[in-house]
Image (cartoon, rainbow, N blue to C red):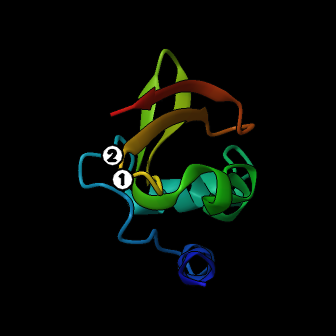
Amino acid sequence: MKIISIFLVLVAGTISAFTHADSDFSRSEIVQLVKEGKILSLEAMLAQYPEKEYGKLLDLEVEREHGKIIYEMEFLRDDGRVLEINVDASNGQLLKQELE
C-alpha cells in the first residue's frame, strides 16, 4: 500500500521521495503537468507496470529525451536483478527496457 500513499502525496501537490534529485523537472512542474493531463500520474503508470510483473519500484526520474517527457523507473525483481524501463509519460508506452 506504500504506492497508494505515494500517489496521495502527488495529489497533494508534491512528488514523492522516489523522484530523483537529477530530474529534469522540479516537483512543482511535474505536479502541474499531471494536473494539466500532459503526463500520466504515478498511479496510472504503476497500474500499467504492476509490482507483480515488474518488481518493487526503487527509483523514478522524470526526464526530457528527444522532445518527450520520460518516466525512467527502476524495479527490483524477485531474482534480485534491477529492471530499468523508460516510458513515455504522456501515454505510458514502453520505450526501452534493460536488465542491470
Q: Residue furthest top?
A: 66
Q: Residue furthest front?
A: 79
Residue 95 image point, x, y percent: 60, 23
Inspect this view and state whether residue 74 appears: yes
Placement of 45 over or under 94, stated as above or below: below
Reading the image, the residue beneath label 1 is 80
Amino acid found under the numbered disc labelled 2: Ser
Inspect this view and state whether residue 50 appears: no
Name the residue located 63 percent from the left edge and 80 percent from the top edge: 4
Classify mark 1: residues with Cα within 10 Å, few (<14), some (14-19) or many (20+).
Answer: few
7 on left or right of 86: right
100 on left or right of 68: left
Name the residue located 44 percent from the left edge and 41 percent from the top edge: 83
Helix, strand or loop at mark 2: loop
Placement of 2 over or under 77, stated as above or below: below
- Circle number at residue 12: none
Classify mark 2: residues with Cα within 10 Å, few (<14), some (14-19) or many (20+).
Answer: some
Reading the image, the residue beneath label 2 is 23
